Amino acid sequence: MCIGIPGQICELLQDQLARVDVCGVKREVDLSLVGAHDERGQARIGQWVLVHVGFAMSVIDPREARATLDALQAMFDVEPDVGALLYGEEKA
């Protein structure tokens, strides 16, 4: 099973690379699959994306992002290994 983690784009870096906030942990994520700008040419800063293995797989709406994060947090409450997905290895 593959799990995508919601993250909010907080900074565009070079080319198709961005800094994405996932539960307070900043990660570099490749935006090649969704683009650094939306269909109107606006930068994706502030938008939510579903991140898997360092790539933004899709753009998601904030409600979907929150619901997914809540579900993952509930999983973490019973299965601590999920913490590595949410908070990175350092908090797992």
Image (cartoon, grey):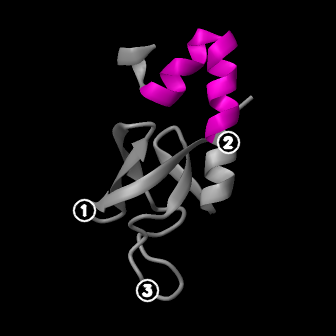
Magenta-colored span: 69-87
The dot on residue 14 is 1
Q: Residue at x 49, y 48 (%)?
A: 7
Give the residue number, with chain letter if any, for mark 2: 68
Give the residue number, with chain letter if any, for mark 3: 41
The picture places residue 8, in percent across and down from the top left corner, at: 45, 53
Q: Which is nearer the N-term, disc 3 or disc 2?
A: 3
Q: Quadrant of residue 79?
A: top right
Q: Residue at x 24, y 62 (%)?
A: 14
Are the residues tagged 1 and 3 within 8 Å (C-beta)?
no
Are the residues tagged 3 and 2 within 8 Å (C-beta)?
no
Report the amino acid beneath label 2.
Thr
Secondary structure mostly seen in magenta is helix
The residues bearing labels 3 and 2 have C-alpha atoms spaced at a distance of 27 Å
Q: Residue at x 68, y 24 (%)?
A: 74
The picture places residue 54, in percent across and down from the top left corner, at: 46, 42
Q: Which is nearer the N-term, disc 1 or disc 3?
A: 1
The residues bearing labels 1 and 3 have C-alpha atoms spaced at a distance of 17 Å
The answer to whether residue 24 is above or below residue 45 is: above
**Visible in this render: residue 3?**
no
